[in-house]
Amino acid sequence: MKILKITIKSQLKHLKLTFLVFIALCFWFFIDYYYKQGIGIYLIGYAIITILPVWLIHTQYLIKNLGVRLIPISIDSFYYVQNGHDKTIEYEDILKVEKIICSTSHEFYNITADYFYHQITLQNGEKIILTCLLAEELPIKVEDIIEKKRFYPFIK
């Protein structure tokens, strides 16, 4: 049985493009400083527009699922453990599943395109959030997943 949890590897997978953009911006900022071209303020603006939302989304996802463990039992059920409290989630308990993804189709322009989360609504009205840092795939097989798009997929 594989236990799903947030690891350093899962975090680095989502932050790799952000690190590359940050290094490129630092390089261009150094070139601008050395040659005094005057575009440094534009680079700072670009960094705020591109890198800040990624760090905010990543931090929000990390806080939301840091103490969560998922233990798949079968195709139709899994254990959901959060801060020592566990419950068994079965397919019959699920009312609906929504996958909230980034609305931009061009990954080159939007480095938040790798971020998404699943919101599972149970029959009793309880909502469970599973971010991409925790699990890329749902731990159970669900046929009808409602896909919603947002420019920045912050958790509401």
Image (cartoon, rainbow, N blue to C red):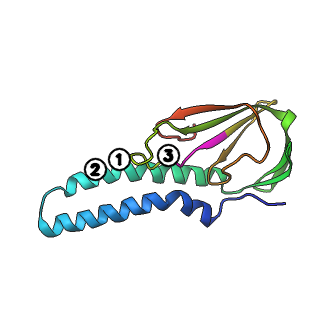
Which of the two labelled residues, at mark 3 and mark 1, occupies the earlier sequence position? 1
Residue tagged 1: 49
**Marks 3 and 2: which is nearer the front?**
3
Residue tagged 3: 113
- Label 1, label 2: how many angstroms apart (C-alpha)? 6 Å
Q: Is residue 106 left or right of residue 117?
A: left
Residue density around tag 2, few if under 14, some if 14–19, many if 20 or more, within 10 Å: few
Residue tagged 2: 45
| Viewer-side residue, 60 vs 144 | 144
Which of the two labelled residues, at mark 3 and mark 2, occupies the earlier sequence position? 2
Indicate the secondary structure of the residue bearing disc 2: helix
What is the x, y in percent for residue 16?
48, 61
Which span is picked out in magenta?
A: 114-118
Three-letter amino acid code of the residue under disc 2: Gly
Q: Quadrant of the N terminus?
A: bottom right
> Residue 95: which quarter of the image?
top right
Residue reaching furthest to the bottom: 34
